[in-house]
Amino acid sequence: MGKNWGHTYVIDNKKMKNNRLENLIQDYLDGKIEEAKMYEDIQDYPLEEVKKCFSDSMEVDYLMSRKYLEVDKEVAYKDFLEQIKLHALDVPEQKKGVIWTIWKYAAIFIGLVGLGLAISFLSKFSNERENIIVAQKEVNLQLGNGKLEIIKETGSTNILDTEGNVIAVQTGDKIKYKPTTNPKEIQYNELNVPYGKKFELELADGTIVYVNSGSILRYPTSFSESKSRQVSLKGEAFFKVAEDKEHPFIVNSGSVNVRVLGTEFNVSAYNEDLETSTVLVSGSVQLYDSLSVGKQQTNVELVPGEMGTWRKDRQSFKTDKVDTSLYTSWVQGKLIFRDMPFKQIRKQLERRYNVTIVNTDTALDKNTFSANFEEESIEEILEILDRTYGIEYTIKENQIIIKKQ
Protein backbone atom coordinates (compact mmCIF):
# COMPACT_ATOMS: atom_id res chain seq x y z
CA MET A 1 0.00 0.00 0.00
CA GLY A 2 1.25 3.54 -0.62
CA LYS A 3 0.96 7.08 0.76
CA ASN A 4 -0.21 9.76 -1.65
CA TRP A 5 1.86 12.99 -1.51
CA GLY A 6 0.50 15.04 -4.43
CA HIS A 7 1.45 13.01 -7.49
CA THR A 8 4.21 11.08 -5.71
CA TYR A 9 3.58 7.56 -4.34
CA VAL A 10 5.84 6.42 -1.53
CA ILE A 11 5.81 2.68 -0.88
CA ASP A 12 5.70 1.92 2.82
CA ASN A 13 7.18 -1.60 3.07
CA LYS A 14 6.47 -1.91 6.78
CA LYS A 15 2.83 -1.03 6.26
CA MET A 16 2.60 -3.47 3.38
CA LYS A 17 3.99 -6.23 5.59
CA ASN A 18 1.56 -5.33 8.37
CA ASN A 19 -1.33 -5.43 5.93
CA ARG A 20 -0.24 -8.88 4.79
CA LEU A 21 -0.22 -10.07 8.40
CA GLU A 22 -3.66 -8.53 9.02
CA ASN A 23 -5.07 -10.22 5.92
CA LEU A 24 -3.47 -13.52 6.91
CA ILE A 25 -4.99 -13.43 10.39
CA GLN A 26 -8.40 -12.38 9.12
CA ASP A 27 -8.37 -15.21 6.57
CA TYR A 28 -7.67 -17.64 9.39
CA LEU A 29 -10.38 -16.17 11.61
CA ASP A 30 -12.81 -16.42 8.69
CA GLY A 31 -11.95 -20.10 8.20
CA LYS A 32 -10.43 -19.53 4.75
CA ILE A 33 -7.01 -21.08 5.48
CA GLU A 34 -5.90 -24.10 7.48
CA GLU A 35 -4.01 -24.03 10.78
CA ALA A 36 -0.89 -25.54 9.23
CA LYS A 37 -0.79 -22.78 6.62
CA MET A 38 -1.32 -20.12 9.27
CA TYR A 39 1.45 -21.53 11.46
CA GLU A 40 3.88 -21.63 8.55
CA ASP A 41 3.24 -18.07 7.34
CA ILE A 42 3.38 -16.23 10.68
CA GLN A 43 6.94 -17.40 11.40
CA ASP A 44 8.22 -14.33 9.51
CA TYR A 45 6.64 -11.93 12.01
CA PRO A 46 7.70 -11.02 15.58
CA LEU A 47 5.61 -12.55 18.32
CA GLU A 48 4.49 -9.20 19.75
CA GLU A 49 3.36 -8.07 16.31
CA VAL A 50 1.30 -11.23 15.88
CA LYS A 51 -0.28 -10.75 19.31
CA LYS A 52 -1.17 -7.12 18.58
CA CYS A 53 -2.65 -7.98 15.21
CA PHE A 54 -4.81 -10.69 16.77
CA SER A 55 -5.98 -8.29 19.45
CA ASP A 56 -6.89 -5.63 16.87
CA SER A 57 -8.80 -8.16 14.76
CA MET A 58 -10.73 -9.36 17.79
CA GLU A 59 -11.66 -5.82 18.75
CA VAL A 60 -13.08 -5.17 15.28
CA ASP A 61 -15.11 -8.37 15.46
CA TYR A 62 -16.26 -7.36 18.91
CA LEU A 63 -17.46 -3.92 17.86
CA MET A 64 -19.20 -5.28 14.76
CA SER A 65 -21.07 -7.98 16.67
CA ARG A 66 -22.56 -5.94 19.53
CA LYS A 67 -25.97 -6.18 17.87
CA TYR A 68 -26.03 -9.96 18.27
CA LEU A 69 -26.25 -10.44 22.02
CA GLU A 70 -28.00 -8.94 24.98
CA VAL A 71 -25.29 -9.97 27.44
CA ASP A 72 -22.88 -7.54 29.10
CA LYS A 73 -20.27 -7.55 26.34
CA GLU A 74 -18.06 -4.91 27.97
CA VAL A 75 -17.61 -7.07 31.05
CA ALA A 76 -17.01 -10.17 28.94
CA TYR A 77 -14.44 -8.45 26.76
CA LYS A 78 -12.52 -6.91 29.68
CA ASP A 79 -12.50 -10.25 31.48
CA PHE A 80 -11.20 -11.92 28.35
CA LEU A 81 -8.33 -9.42 27.94
CA GLU A 82 -7.43 -9.88 31.60
CA GLN A 83 -7.27 -13.65 31.11
CA ILE A 84 -4.89 -13.19 28.18
CA LYS A 85 -2.53 -11.18 30.41
CA LEU A 86 -2.61 -13.87 33.09
CA HIS A 87 -1.76 -16.72 30.74
CA ALA A 88 0.70 -14.88 28.49
CA LEU A 89 3.28 -14.26 31.24
CA ASP A 90 6.61 -16.03 31.60
CA VAL A 91 6.53 -17.85 28.25
CA PRO A 92 9.83 -18.04 26.31
CA GLU A 93 9.43 -16.08 23.07
CA GLN A 94 11.62 -18.38 21.04
CA LYS A 95 9.30 -21.35 21.48
CA LYS A 96 7.19 -21.87 18.38
CA GLY A 97 4.54 -23.44 20.55
CA VAL A 98 3.76 -20.00 21.94
CA ILE A 99 2.62 -18.74 18.55
CA TRP A 100 0.68 -21.95 17.97
CA THR A 101 -1.15 -21.48 21.29
CA ILE A 102 -1.91 -17.81 20.65
CA TRP A 103 -3.60 -18.21 17.31
CA LYS A 104 -5.14 -21.58 18.11
CA TYR A 105 -7.32 -19.71 20.60
CA ALA A 106 -8.83 -17.73 17.74
CA ALA A 107 -10.64 -20.79 16.40
CA ILE A 108 -13.43 -20.43 18.95
CA PHE A 109 -16.37 -18.02 18.69
CA ILE A 110 -14.43 -15.26 16.97
CA GLY A 111 -17.57 -13.57 15.72
CA LEU A 112 -19.55 -13.32 18.94
CA VAL A 113 -17.80 -10.42 20.65
CA GLY A 114 -14.33 -10.96 19.25
CA LEU A 115 -13.41 -13.35 22.04
CA GLY A 116 -11.60 -15.95 19.99
CA LEU A 117 -8.11 -15.55 21.45
CA ALA A 118 -7.55 -17.84 24.47
CA ILE A 119 -11.06 -18.90 25.41
CA SER A 120 -10.65 -22.53 24.39
CA PHE A 121 -7.47 -22.61 26.48
CA LEU A 122 -9.30 -21.28 29.52
CA SER A 123 -12.06 -23.84 29.21
CA LYS A 124 -9.60 -26.67 29.81
CA PHE A 125 -8.96 -25.48 33.38
CA SER A 126 -12.42 -26.32 34.66
CA ASN A 127 -13.31 -29.83 35.82
CA GLU A 128 -16.32 -28.73 37.83
CA ARG A 129 -18.95 -29.83 35.33
CA GLU A 130 -20.46 -33.26 35.16
CA ASN A 131 -19.32 -35.19 32.09
CA ILE A 132 -21.85 -35.85 29.37
CA ILE A 133 -22.70 -39.51 28.89
CA VAL A 134 -22.89 -40.22 25.17
CA ALA A 135 -24.27 -43.53 23.94
CA GLN A 136 -21.88 -44.64 21.22
CA LYS A 137 -23.77 -46.06 18.25
CA GLU A 138 -22.05 -47.83 15.39
CA VAL A 139 -22.35 -47.23 11.67
CA ASN A 140 -24.40 -50.02 10.09
CA LEU A 141 -24.82 -51.32 6.55
CA GLN A 142 -28.00 -52.97 5.30
CA LEU A 143 -27.04 -55.41 2.54
CA GLY A 144 -29.10 -56.41 -0.46
CA ASN A 145 -29.77 -59.84 1.04
CA GLY A 146 -31.32 -58.29 4.14
CA LYS A 147 -28.31 -58.90 6.39
CA LEU A 148 -27.28 -56.07 8.70
CA GLU A 149 -23.54 -55.45 9.05
CA ILE A 150 -22.23 -53.48 12.04
CA ILE A 151 -19.24 -51.45 10.89
CA LYS A 152 -16.34 -51.45 13.34
CA GLU A 153 -14.28 -48.38 12.44
CA THR A 154 -11.16 -49.87 14.02
CA GLY A 155 -11.28 -52.97 11.86
CA SER A 156 -11.48 -54.21 8.30
CA THR A 157 -13.85 -56.60 6.54
CA ASN A 158 -15.09 -57.72 3.12
CA ILE A 159 -18.59 -56.82 1.92
CA LEU A 160 -20.31 -59.66 0.06
CA ASP A 161 -23.19 -59.80 -2.41
CA THR A 162 -26.06 -62.31 -2.27
CA GLU A 163 -23.91 -64.93 -4.01
CA GLY A 164 -21.00 -64.56 -1.60
CA ASN A 165 -18.75 -62.56 -3.95
CA VAL A 166 -16.59 -59.77 -2.53
CA ILE A 167 -17.97 -56.47 -3.88
CA ALA A 168 -16.32 -54.05 -1.47
CA VAL A 169 -13.73 -53.71 1.26
CA GLN A 170 -14.28 -51.80 4.48
CA THR A 171 -11.21 -50.34 6.20
CA GLY A 172 -11.74 -48.05 9.19
CA ASP A 173 -14.30 -45.39 8.36
CA LYS A 174 -14.35 -46.07 4.61
CA ILE A 175 -15.90 -48.61 2.24
CA LYS A 176 -14.57 -48.97 -1.31
CA TYR A 177 -16.67 -50.84 -3.87
CA LYS A 178 -15.11 -52.72 -6.76
CA PRO A 179 -15.80 -51.48 -10.32
CA THR A 180 -18.43 -53.63 -11.98
CA THR A 181 -20.02 -53.38 -15.43
CA ASN A 182 -23.18 -55.01 -16.72
CA PRO A 183 -24.19 -56.76 -13.48
CA LYS A 184 -26.75 -59.54 -13.73
CA GLU A 185 -28.86 -57.90 -11.05
CA ILE A 186 -28.71 -54.44 -9.46
CA GLN A 187 -28.45 -54.79 -5.69
CA TYR A 188 -28.70 -51.98 -3.18
CA ASN A 189 -26.91 -51.31 0.08
CA GLU A 190 -28.04 -48.79 2.69
CA LEU A 191 -25.51 -47.03 4.91
CA ASN A 192 -26.81 -45.63 8.20
CA VAL A 193 -24.49 -43.15 9.95
CA PRO A 194 -25.68 -42.25 13.49
CA TYR A 195 -25.23 -38.93 15.27
CA GLY A 196 -21.66 -38.39 16.37
CA LYS A 197 -20.16 -40.18 13.32
CA LYS A 198 -19.31 -39.57 9.67
CA PHE A 199 -18.30 -42.04 6.99
CA GLU A 200 -16.72 -42.23 3.53
CA LEU A 201 -17.81 -44.33 0.55
CA GLU A 202 -16.27 -44.96 -2.83
CA LEU A 203 -18.99 -46.23 -5.14
CA ALA A 204 -18.46 -48.70 -7.97
CA ASP A 205 -18.20 -45.87 -10.54
CA GLY A 206 -15.44 -44.11 -8.58
CA THR A 207 -17.72 -41.47 -7.03
CA ILE A 208 -16.61 -40.44 -3.52
CA VAL A 209 -19.33 -39.73 -0.94
CA TYR A 210 -18.76 -38.33 2.55
CA VAL A 211 -21.83 -39.10 4.66
CA ASN A 212 -22.48 -36.84 7.64
CA SER A 213 -23.92 -37.75 11.04
CA GLY A 214 -27.58 -38.68 11.31
CA SER A 215 -27.75 -39.63 7.61
CA ILE A 216 -28.85 -42.60 5.48
CA LEU A 217 -27.55 -43.24 1.95
CA ARG A 218 -29.07 -45.92 -0.29
CA TYR A 219 -27.08 -46.80 -3.39
CA PRO A 220 -26.51 -49.60 -5.91
CA THR A 221 -23.46 -51.80 -5.44
CA SER A 222 -22.87 -51.54 -9.19
CA PHE A 223 -24.18 -49.38 -12.04
CA SER A 224 -25.85 -50.48 -15.27
CA GLU A 225 -24.42 -49.13 -18.52
CA SER A 226 -27.92 -48.54 -19.84
CA LYS A 227 -29.27 -46.44 -16.97
CA SER A 228 -28.51 -43.30 -14.98
CA ARG A 229 -26.66 -43.57 -11.69
CA GLN A 230 -29.11 -42.96 -8.84
CA VAL A 231 -28.73 -42.84 -5.06
CA SER A 232 -31.13 -41.76 -2.29
CA LEU A 233 -30.18 -39.54 0.66
CA LYS A 234 -31.77 -38.68 3.99
CA GLY A 235 -29.54 -36.28 5.88
CA GLU A 236 -26.34 -34.73 4.56
CA ALA A 237 -23.55 -35.85 2.24
CA PHE A 238 -20.78 -34.35 0.12
CA PHE A 239 -20.35 -35.85 -3.35
CA LYS A 240 -17.33 -35.96 -5.66
CA VAL A 241 -19.01 -37.46 -8.70
CA ALA A 242 -16.95 -39.41 -11.23
CA GLU A 243 -17.56 -37.90 -14.66
CA ASP A 244 -19.67 -39.95 -17.07
CA LYS A 245 -21.52 -37.86 -19.65
CA GLU A 246 -23.53 -40.85 -20.85
CA HIS A 247 -24.85 -41.70 -17.39
CA PRO A 248 -26.02 -38.74 -15.26
CA PHE A 249 -25.65 -39.04 -11.51
CA ILE A 250 -28.90 -38.32 -9.64
CA VAL A 251 -29.33 -37.80 -5.90
CA ASN A 252 -32.91 -38.33 -4.70
CA SER A 253 -33.36 -36.37 -1.47
CA GLY A 254 -37.06 -36.53 -0.78
CA SER A 255 -38.73 -33.55 -2.42
CA VAL A 256 -35.64 -32.55 -4.41
CA ASN A 257 -33.58 -34.39 -7.02
CA VAL A 258 -30.05 -33.29 -7.96
CA ARG A 259 -28.83 -34.22 -11.45
CA VAL A 260 -25.13 -33.99 -12.38
CA LEU A 261 -22.56 -35.42 -14.80
CA GLY A 262 -19.34 -34.91 -12.86
CA THR A 263 -18.92 -32.38 -10.08
CA GLU A 264 -18.47 -31.67 -6.36
CA PHE A 265 -21.43 -30.60 -4.26
CA ASN A 266 -23.04 -30.86 -0.82
CA VAL A 267 -26.64 -31.89 -0.17
CA SER A 268 -28.39 -31.34 3.17
CA ALA A 269 -31.81 -32.99 3.36
CA TYR A 270 -32.65 -33.89 6.95
CA ASN A 271 -36.30 -34.82 7.41
CA GLU A 272 -36.72 -32.48 10.38
CA ASP A 273 -35.35 -29.43 8.53
CA LEU A 274 -37.70 -27.04 6.76
CA GLU A 275 -35.26 -26.60 3.88
CA THR A 276 -33.29 -28.89 1.57
CA SER A 277 -30.11 -27.25 0.29
CA THR A 278 -27.54 -28.03 -2.39
CA VAL A 279 -24.21 -26.18 -2.47
CA LEU A 280 -22.13 -26.44 -5.64
CA VAL A 281 -18.33 -26.38 -5.30
CA SER A 282 -17.36 -27.19 -8.89
CA GLY A 283 -19.00 -28.28 -12.15
CA SER A 284 -22.73 -27.80 -12.64
CA VAL A 285 -25.91 -29.31 -11.25
CA GLN A 286 -29.60 -29.18 -12.01
CA LEU A 287 -32.17 -29.24 -9.23
CA TYR A 288 -35.76 -30.25 -9.77
CA ASP A 289 -38.61 -31.07 -7.45
CA SER A 290 -39.72 -34.68 -7.33
CA LEU A 291 -43.27 -33.91 -6.22
CA SER A 292 -44.63 -32.45 -9.47
CA VAL A 293 -46.14 -35.66 -10.77
CA GLY A 294 -48.33 -35.01 -13.79
CA LYS A 295 -47.40 -31.32 -14.03
CA GLN A 296 -44.47 -29.20 -15.05
CA GLN A 297 -41.51 -29.52 -12.68
CA THR A 298 -39.61 -26.63 -11.16
CA ASN A 299 -35.98 -26.63 -12.36
CA VAL A 300 -32.97 -24.67 -11.14
CA GLU A 301 -29.43 -24.81 -12.50
CA LEU A 302 -26.51 -23.90 -10.21
CA VAL A 303 -23.05 -22.59 -11.01
CA PRO A 304 -20.05 -22.97 -8.65
CA GLY A 305 -20.39 -20.86 -5.52
CA GLU A 306 -24.19 -21.02 -5.50
CA MET A 307 -26.63 -22.66 -3.11
CA GLY A 308 -30.05 -23.83 -4.20
CA THR A 309 -32.61 -24.09 -1.39
CA TRP A 310 -35.98 -25.80 -1.55
CA ARG A 311 -38.57 -24.62 0.98
CA LYS A 312 -40.81 -27.55 1.83
CA ASP A 313 -43.67 -25.32 2.96
CA ARG A 314 -43.56 -23.03 -0.09
CA GLN A 315 -42.75 -25.73 -2.65
CA SER A 316 -40.24 -23.45 -4.38
CA PHE A 317 -36.51 -22.93 -4.98
CA LYS A 318 -34.29 -19.95 -4.33
CA THR A 319 -30.60 -19.46 -5.15
CA ASP A 320 -27.89 -17.52 -3.31
CA LYS A 321 -24.19 -16.83 -3.71
CA VAL A 322 -22.37 -18.41 -0.76
CA ASP A 323 -18.95 -19.23 0.67
CA THR A 324 -18.97 -22.96 -0.05
CA SER A 325 -16.44 -23.71 2.71
CA LEU A 326 -19.08 -22.86 5.33
CA TYR A 327 -21.19 -25.76 4.08
CA THR A 328 -18.46 -28.31 3.34
CA SER A 329 -16.08 -27.83 6.30
CA TRP A 330 -17.68 -30.78 8.12
CA VAL A 331 -15.93 -33.12 5.67
CA GLN A 332 -12.60 -32.08 7.28
CA GLY A 333 -14.09 -32.43 10.76
CA LYS A 334 -14.77 -28.70 11.18
CA LEU A 335 -17.87 -26.68 11.98
CA ILE A 336 -17.88 -23.09 10.72
CA PHE A 337 -20.83 -20.82 11.52
CA ARG A 338 -21.34 -17.29 10.21
CA ASP A 339 -24.25 -15.19 11.50
CA MET A 340 -26.19 -18.35 12.27
CA PRO A 341 -29.09 -18.39 14.74
CA PHE A 342 -28.34 -20.34 17.90
CA LYS A 343 -31.30 -22.61 17.16
CA GLN A 344 -29.54 -23.90 14.04
CA ILE A 345 -26.17 -24.10 15.79
CA ARG A 346 -27.48 -26.31 18.59
CA LYS A 347 -29.11 -28.61 16.03
CA GLN A 348 -25.75 -29.07 14.29
CA LEU A 349 -24.06 -29.64 17.65
CA GLU A 350 -26.62 -32.32 18.48
CA ARG A 351 -25.82 -34.15 15.26
CA ARG A 352 -22.08 -33.72 15.59
CA TYR A 353 -21.80 -34.87 19.20
CA ASN A 354 -24.83 -37.18 19.52
CA VAL A 355 -26.41 -35.22 22.38
CA THR A 356 -29.76 -33.57 23.02
CA ILE A 357 -29.78 -29.82 23.73
CA VAL A 358 -32.94 -28.44 25.35
CA ASN A 359 -33.04 -24.64 25.31
CA THR A 360 -35.49 -23.05 27.76
CA ASP A 361 -34.31 -19.56 26.81
CA THR A 362 -36.31 -18.81 23.64
CA ALA A 363 -34.67 -15.40 23.20
CA LEU A 364 -31.25 -17.06 22.89
CA ASP A 365 -32.45 -19.13 19.93
CA LYS A 366 -32.92 -15.96 17.91
CA ASN A 367 -29.42 -14.57 18.55
CA THR A 368 -26.94 -15.03 15.71
CA PHE A 369 -23.37 -16.21 16.23
CA SER A 370 -20.17 -16.87 14.31
CA ALA A 371 -17.79 -19.62 15.34
CA ASN A 372 -15.06 -22.03 14.24
CA PHE A 373 -14.93 -25.48 15.86
CA GLU A 374 -12.58 -28.34 15.09
CA GLU A 375 -11.18 -30.50 17.87
CA GLU A 376 -13.21 -29.12 20.77
CA SER A 377 -15.37 -31.49 22.78
CA ILE A 378 -19.00 -30.63 23.53
CA GLU A 379 -17.98 -30.05 27.16
CA GLU A 380 -15.41 -27.45 26.09
CA ILE A 381 -17.90 -25.66 23.88
CA LEU A 382 -20.47 -25.49 26.67
CA GLU A 383 -17.87 -24.21 29.10
CA ILE A 384 -16.94 -21.46 26.65
CA LEU A 385 -20.57 -20.38 26.40
CA ASP A 386 -20.92 -20.33 30.18
CA ARG A 387 -17.67 -18.49 30.93
CA THR A 388 -18.09 -15.92 28.17
CA TYR A 389 -21.81 -15.22 28.03
CA GLY A 390 -23.22 -16.58 31.24
CA ILE A 391 -25.23 -19.22 29.38
CA GLU A 392 -25.88 -21.61 32.24
CA TYR A 393 -26.78 -25.23 31.74
CA THR A 394 -27.24 -28.54 33.52
CA ILE A 395 -26.36 -32.03 32.31
CA LYS A 396 -28.44 -35.18 32.70
CA GLU A 397 -26.73 -38.11 31.01
CA ASN A 398 -26.61 -37.07 27.33
CA GLN A 399 -29.12 -34.26 27.69
CA ILE A 400 -27.98 -30.65 28.02
CA ILE A 401 -30.54 -28.21 29.42
CA ILE A 402 -29.84 -24.51 28.91
CA LYS A 403 -31.35 -22.41 31.66
CA LYS A 404 -33.38 -19.28 31.06
CA GLN A 405 -31.49 -16.13 32.01
Image (cartoon, helix red, strand yellow):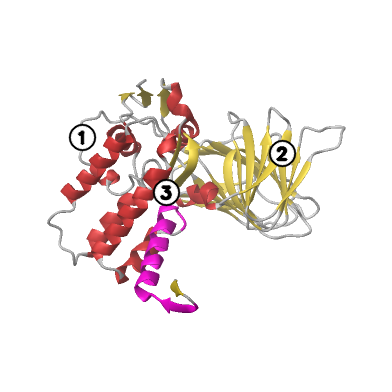
The magenta segment: 7-32
Secondary structure of the residue carrying numbered label 1: loop
**Left or right for 344, reference 124:** right
Q: Residues within 10 Å of mark 2 (few under 14, many from 20)?
A: many
Residue 164 in picture, x, y percent from top left: 60, 47
Find disc 1 in the rendering and name its residue.
127
**Left or right for 40, reference 211:** left
Find disc 3 in the rendering and name its residue.
155
Q: Amino acid at mark 3?
A: Gly
* Camera-side residue of 294 and 41: 41
- Mark 2 and mark 3: Cα distance apart in space: 43 Å
Residue 27 in picture, x, y percent from top left: 44, 58
Q: Amino acid at mark 2?
A: Phe
Which label sits in the foreground, 1 or 2? 2
Residue at position x 18%, y 64% in the image:
93
Say whether residue 316 is visible.
yes
Secondary structure of the residue carrying numbered label 3: loop
Mark 1 or mark 2: which comes first in sequence? Answer: 1
Quadrant of the rendered image containing residue 43? bottom left
Find disc 2 in the rendering and name its residue.
317
* Camera-side residue of 377 and 344: 344
